[in-house]
Image (spheres, helix red, strand yellow):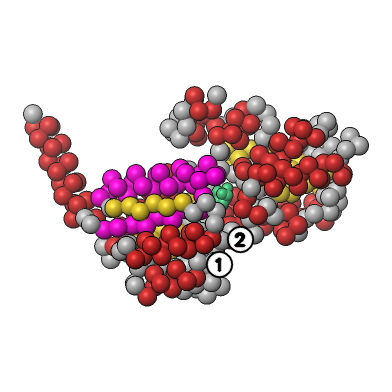
Amino acid sequence: MKNVLAIVLCALLLIVSVGAMADGQKVGVSMPTKDLQRWNQDGENMQKLLEAAGYTVDLQYASNDVQTQLSQIENMISEGADVLVIAAIEGSSLGEALTMAKDESIPVIAYDRLLMESDAVSYYATFDNYMVGTVQGTYIKEQLDLENAAGPFNLEITAGDPGDNNAGYFYQGAIDVLKPYIDAGKLVVKSGQVAFDDVATPTWATETAQTRAENILSSFYADGTNVDVWLCSNDSTALGVENALAANYTGTYPIITGQDCDIANTKNMIAGKQSMSVFKDTRTLAAQVVKMVGQILSGETVDVNDTETYNNNVIVVPSFLCEPVFADANNYKALLIDSGYYTEDQLK
Ligand code: BGC
C-alpha cells in the first residue's frame, strides 16, 4: 500500500513539474522530407518526447523543397512558437526565416544539419559527423589491410548532398583515412572522380546515386574489372549503388559502406549486399534536443560538448555531438533489435 501511494505521489509530482515546465509552450519542428526513412523517425521521436514533456508540437515536413520549408518555419513563428528545431534541406537557404525568428527572440536549434550563414542559430545537436566518415574510412582500411596488402584495389566514391553541411564532414572524415593510399596508388579510382563535387549526390537521392553508379560501371568496369570497394556516405546513396551493382555488374561484389542503418540497408547487410553502416540512434538525438529545449526555456545552462568545430561562416555554434556507432551483420541484432529500434519482423 505504501508503495502504491509512493508511486501515485511520484506520478503526480512528475505531472505537476512537467506541467509547470512546459505548460502552453510551443515547439516548432521543421523536418526536410518524408522520403528518407530517418527523418520520419526523427520527427516521430521528437514529437513523442516533446508531447510527453508537456509541450505543444508543430511538426512539419517540407518535401525537400526549400521554399516550402521557409514558409513552414515562417508559419511556426507567426503561430507563436517558443523554440524552433530545424533540420534544414539546404543549410544556407533559410536566412529570412532565421532573421524573423531572431527578431522575435525565438531560440533556434539546428537539428542534425547545421544552419549556415546566420547568427540566429542558438545551438546545434548532431552526431559527430567527421567521426562517421572516419569509421567508414577505417573500416575500408582494415578490411583491405591497406597497410600490408600490395593492392592495388579499385575504389569508387559516392558522397552526399552539397547543400547539406554534414556531407562534407562525412566525405572528409573518410578521405583523410584513405587519401594516403590513393596517393600511394594502393587505391585506384578508375572513374577519376574523387573530389567532393564530382562524387556528390544532390538531395541524397537513391535514384541519382544509382544512375551515376550505372554510368561508372558501364564505362570502367564492363570488361570484368572488379570494383573492390565503394565508399558511400550514407544508406540512401549506398542503396542506389547496390541497385546499380545488382543490374550491371558481374565481378566480385565490393565492400560497401553506409550510414543510418535504414531498414532496406540493414536487410542488405544481413543478405551480404552491404558491408557496414553507421548507427546513429535517432532516439538519443531527439532526447538530447528535448533536453536542450527544456534547458533553454527554463534559462538553465544548456549542455554542449563542442564549442569549436561548427562554424556556420558567421558564428561558431555551441554544439552537442552524440556518438555514432559502427554496425554490421555481426552486431545489428544487439544494436537494433535488442535495443528496440526495430522489431525482428521489420528486418524480414
Ligand atoms: C544525415 C544523415 C542522412 C542524410 C540524408 C544527413 O544530414 O546526417 O544521417 O543519411 O542527411 O538524409
Compared to residue 327, the image places residue 288 above or below, namely below
User: Is residue 65 covered in magenta?
Assistant: no
Task: Classify residue 4 by image quadrant.
Answer: top left
Classify the position of the N terminus by image quarter. top left
Disc 1 residue type?
Answer: Ser
Q: Residue at x 39, y 51 (%)?
A: 59
- The residue nearer to you, when weighing 53 against 295, is 53
Q: Which residue is mark 2?
A: 163
Disc 2 residue type?
Answer: Gly
Left or right: residue 90 versus residue 194 is left
Task: Tell me which segment is drawn in magenta.
Answer: 25-54
Q: Residue at x 18, y 46 (%)?
A: 15
Mark 2 is surrounded, within 10 Å at the Cα level, by few (under 14), some (14 to 19) or many (20 or more) other residues, namely many
Mark 2 residue CB less than 8 A from any atom of ligand 1 = no
Classify the position of the C terminus by image quarter. top right
Task: Classify residue 167 by image quadrant.
Answer: bottom right
- The residue nearer to you, when weighing 199 against 172, is 199
Which percent across, then down, holds residue 298? 26, 62
Q: Which residue is mark 1?
A: 92
**Could you tell which of marks 1 and 2 lies nearer the N-terminus?**
1
